[in-house]
Image: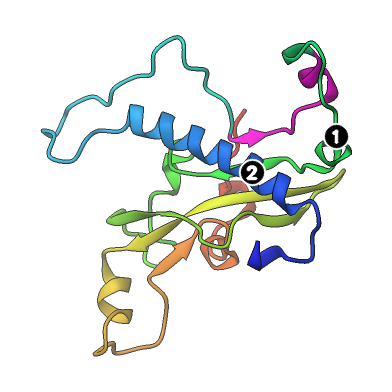
């Protein structure tokens, strides 16, 4: 809330984003190889009962509210919810490299702490929510710690301009 205090609908938007984040964390955890597992082990798969949604989540419509409740409580705030695109390794495994030195020796360090980033879409405003990537290769050696030789970054958010700076528009992953 403190990063987006000028937007009155923010509470409903953040609640909706929190539910999406929980869902993505759940499906990512269910399909990830655990630490300490032998190399060559296939990642587990999701059960048939778990739907695979995303990476773009559209807000619920009035139809969703009507069909899920006999007497729906329809509030005008739900009309102002923005779509959310999740930029996460579950959906885009090809992003698993440092945007500066191109090493694939990286760590995923959780979600961005400032919440969803506002994006101005063609038809309407949207939001994007990403994770933090930490380079464990050359960038970390060059830029981390008190003895760093140079000024620079070795941690990036997947919603930050710096993360996409060296990519061409045709390199941007899309779900077809």
- The residue singled out by tag 2 in the image is 15
Q: Which mark is residue 5?
A: none
Residue 78 seen = yes
Q: Quadrant of residue 86?
A: top right
For the residue pair 68 and 94, the one nearer the viewer reads as: 68
Please check the rendered image and state whether residue 163 is part of the magenta-colored stretch, yes or no.
no
Q: Are marks 2 and 1 in contact (CB under 8 Å)?
A: no
> Magenta span covers which residues?
55-66
- Tell me the distance, in whole angstroms, between the alpha carbons under discs 2 and 1: 15 Å
SS type, badge 1: loop
175 left or right, relative to 6: left
Which residue is painted at 85% across and 45% down in the image?
124
Q: Earlier in the sequence, mark 2 or mark 1?
A: 2
Assign the C terminus to one quadrant of the image: top right
- Residue 41 place in picture, x, y as percent: 17, 27
SS type, badge 2: helix
Which residue is painted at 40% across and 67% down in the image?
155
Asked if 39 appears above or below 105 in the picture, the reply is above
- The residue singled out by tag 1 in the image is 75
> Colour scheme of this structure image?
rainbow
Q: Quadrant of residue 119?
A: bottom right
For the residue pair 68 and 86, the one nearer the viewer reads as: 68
Which residue is painted at 26% across and 66% down in the image?
137
48 left or right, relative to 124: left
- Residue 167 place in picture, x, y as percent: 55, 58
């Amino acid at each position: 809330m403190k990063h987006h205090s000028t937007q009155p609908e923010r509470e409903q938007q953040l609640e909706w984003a929190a539910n999406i984040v929980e869902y993505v964390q759940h499906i990512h955890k269910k399909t990830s190889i655990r630490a300490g597992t032998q190399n060559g082990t296939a990642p587990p798969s999701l059960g048939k009962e778990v739907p695979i949604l995303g990476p773009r989540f559209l807000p619920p419509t009035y139809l969703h509210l009507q069909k899920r409740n006999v007497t729906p409580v329809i509030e005008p705030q739900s009309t102002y919810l923005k779509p959310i695109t999740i930029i996460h390794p579950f959906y885009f495994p090809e992003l698993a490299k440092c945007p500066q030195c191109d090493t694939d020796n990286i760590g995923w360090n959780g979600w961005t702490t400032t919440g969803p980033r506002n994006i101005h879409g063609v038809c309407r405003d949207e939001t994007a929510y990403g994770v933090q990537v930490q380079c464990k290769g050359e960038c970390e050696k060059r830029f981390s710690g008190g003895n760093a030789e140079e000024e620079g970054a070795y941690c990036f958010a997947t919603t930050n301009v710096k993360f996409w700076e060296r990519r061409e528009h045709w390199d941007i992953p899309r779900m077809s």
